[in-house]
Amino acid sequence: MMDRITYCLFLAVLIASCQNPKRESEKIDDTIKPESEQREVPGGKDGVDSEDRAVRSLATAELHDSSFVFIEKWSDDFVYDMKYATTDNFIGKKVYDCDQCMIRKKVALALMKANRDFMEKGYRIKFFDCYRPLDVQKIMWEVYPVEGYVANPYTSGSIHNRGGAVDITLVDNEENELDMGTGFDHFGEEAHHAYRHLPEKVLGNRKLLKDIMEKHGFKPIRTEWWHYNFGESRAFALSNFPTKCD
Ligand SMILES: C[C@@H](N)C(=O)N[C@H](C)C(=O)O
Ligand SMILES: [Zn+2]
């Protein structure tokens, strides 16, 4: 009799898990930004005021800190060149279907605050990469299995796979990239933070990026000037859903 009950319980649990409800951490934001917050109000100084409103709007949205959001939906003030949605990357192949930046809500908020600081100085963030599915990490590892430049997907994976890392640079008001000394995904010592044989201007640009990102809770990695991990993002779950646009 007991065995029958245990068996029924087991069956019920199995059926429930097969329905595979999305974990909170993998829920994707489908809220609509209020109409009044979609347009910049005239008089805002270089978009900084509108960025403040955008931060408030996302901060008060009914979303879990770990929900994935499309940052483009919450702020008009970023620039995008999502390299893995093109063939212009070290893999030589387009590996994303979507060219938008998808990231955890908590990380998006910090990025919007950092962007506000950059905008006060006449710059803004340009994204090269945000959330990255674990399967894409495996493709990268096949092409370039060197830790420091590509995180090992078979150990702890990349913070990109957890929706907590971004690859970025800065652009000016005409959307010209600041000179950072190397291109994106230059896997060599010239891209390291400790590499000093660069013009003062380049060192200053890297420092500007690093200082403001650190102020907002991001941590650089030793080997790539463009890569920033947010806070304790290892706490976010590894994800592997494909990058699909809204
Ligand atoms: C591949 C490169 N853009 C990158 O993000 N590297 C770091 C180390 C990573 O894979 O997490
Ligand atoms: Zn990166």
Image (spheres, rainbow, N blue to C red):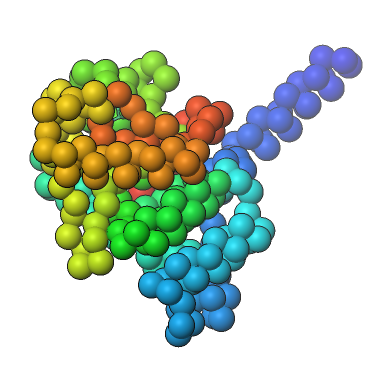
User: Residue most toward the right?
Assistant: 1
Give the total of numbered labels. 0
Q: In terms of image quarters, where does ligand 1 lie?
A: top left
At horizontal 11% and vertical 38% (from top left) the residue drawn is: 199
At horizontal 57% and vertical 43% (from top left) the residue drawn is: 66
Relative to 195, does residue 35 appear above or below in the rendering?
Answer: below
In the image, 47 versus 138, the foreground residue is 47
Relative to 130, does residue 238 appear above or below in the rendering?
Answer: above
Query: Residue 81: x and y, percent?
Result: 23, 54
Q: Where on the picture, by quarter, is residue 140?
A: top left
Query: Residue 101: x and y, percent?
Result: 37, 53
In the image, 163 versus 229, the foreground residue is 229
Question: For the C terminus, which image quadrant?
Answer: bottom left
Is 175 placed left or right of 112 in the picture? left
At horizontal 24% and vertical 42% (from top left) the residue drawn is: 204
In the image, 67 versus 108, the foreground residue is 108
Is residue 242 among the parts visible in the rendering? no
Is 200 placed left or right of 106 in the picture? left
Q: Where on the picture, by quarter, is residue 165?
A: top left
Is residue 113 among the parts visible in the rendering? yes
Relative to 54, does residue 95 appear above or below in the rendering?
Answer: above
Is 120 placed left or right of 26 in the picture? left
Relative to 178, does residue 233 appear above or below in the rendering?
Answer: above
User: Residue most toward the front?
Assistant: 200
Query: Residue 221: x and y, percent?
Result: 33, 27
Question: For the N terminus, which image quadrant?
Answer: top right
At horizontal 39% and vertical 68% (from top left) the residue drawn is: 76
In the image, 165 versus 210, the foreground residue is 210
